Amino acid sequence: MTETTELAPDQLEEKGASIEEVLEELARLYLRTVALPLPRNPATLAWQTTAGGLAALAARALYYVALDDSERAAALASFYRGPLGDGPHPLGVGLWIERNITKPAGADIDEWAAEAKEGAQAALAAASKPTGLRDLGAVLGDDVLALLISGLGASWKEWEERGSTRRLCFLPGCTHEVDLVAAWSGTDGSHGEGWMSSSAVGYACPEHAARLWANDCQHIPAWQATGGGSSAELRCTCGWASGAVAFRGHGTTLYQVHALEVLGARA
Ligand SMILES: [Zn+2]
Ligand SMILES: [Zn+2]
């Protein structure tokens, strides 16, 4: 076992203490990624686990490189710091990867970048999927709920009376409403059962959620950037799209019309 080998102080002196600093930073980063509580969001947890594994790998690699070649280790440490102290420069990293990894592998870095973009877009689409209100309460957890509730204002009763915690179904003409806090906290029996929340257009009552968003229904709305400027368009999984709009409210209204047409056709 060579695990107990220690870096001799003179091996670190030449280029200052930056190797030690980076080792310490990596070790602390690793410990942070495994400290409890872990994040509840599965995607966040996965990235955190990945970051922890990479920090452990990088710390080990840097440690052993420093034993054999302190100059190279110092160069790696300063690479990690980056030219501005905020991490490696993306352009430099991209060029290095292309020259040393993708080209020798006979691959095209643009293809890898395109695949990465697809992954990011799929993650965004998954994040904008409508969520059941009661599930959201479970995801947020009691601490966040308490914070949310206390953040709504000092007079809880007043908020309730003014209806600030109540939301109507997004569909015009539907008068069903839900009390968000009752649904999230689960204190009020089955209140909120079947309601869903879409970050794109708002809330849907159980009937309309079941007919538009749940299970195999193909009318899930999600915003997509449309290239230039600040405009975006609202796209439905059925293929319908609002066209580029400058104001989100316009897209939401067009989606409401689309939903009415879909429901009307099926009624
Ligand atoms: Zn409704
Ligand atoms: Zn649709």
Image: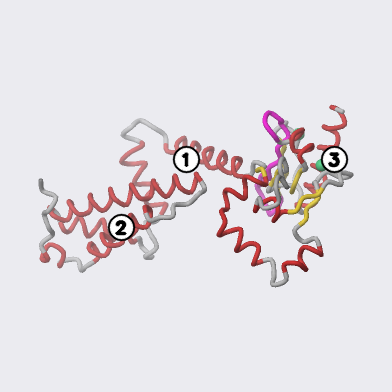
Q: Residue at x 47, y 40 (%)?
A: 113
Q: Is residue 20 left or right of residue 150?
A: left
Marks 3 and 1, the one that precedes in the sequence:
1
Look at 57% across and 49% down and name the residue there: 139
Cα separation, mark 2 vs mark 3, equals 53 Å
Q: Quadrant of the N terminus?
A: top left
Report the quarter where the C terminus lies.
top right
Q: Quadrant of residue 171?
A: top right
Earlier sequence position, callout 2 versus callout 3: 2
Q: Which circle marks residue 113 in the picture? A: 1
Whether residue 119 is situated above or below residue 177 in the rendered picture:
above
**Amino acid identity at mark 1:** Ala
Q: Nearer the viewer, residue 228 or 128?
A: 128
Tell me, yes or no, whether the highlighted magenta stretch contains residue 165.
no
Instruction: Tell me: residue 132, above or below residue 160.
Output: above
Foreground mark, 3 or 1? 3
Residue 229 on the magenta segment: yes
- Determine whether, in the image, residue 211 is placed left or right of residue 22: right
Using the image as rendered, state which of residue 262 and residue 150 is in the foreground. 150
Q: CA distance from mark 3 to mark 1?
A: 37 Å
In three-dimensional space, the C-alpha distance between marks 1 and 2, rounded to whole angstroms, equals 27 Å
Q: Which residues are magenta?
A: 214-231
Identified by mark 3, the residue type is Val
Badge 1 marks a residue whose secondary structure is helix
Label at residue 26? 2
Seen at 33% across and 32% down, the residue is 105
Secondary structure under the numbered disc 2 in the rendered image: helix
Q: Quadrant of residue 224?
A: top right
Question: Which residue does the numbered mark 3 point to in the structure image?
Answer: 257
Report crowding for label 1: few under 14, some 14 to 19, many 20 or more residues within 10 A (C-alpha).
Answer: few
User: Which SS does the magenta portion mostly show?
Assistant: loop
On screen, residue 169 versus residue 214, left or right, reads: right
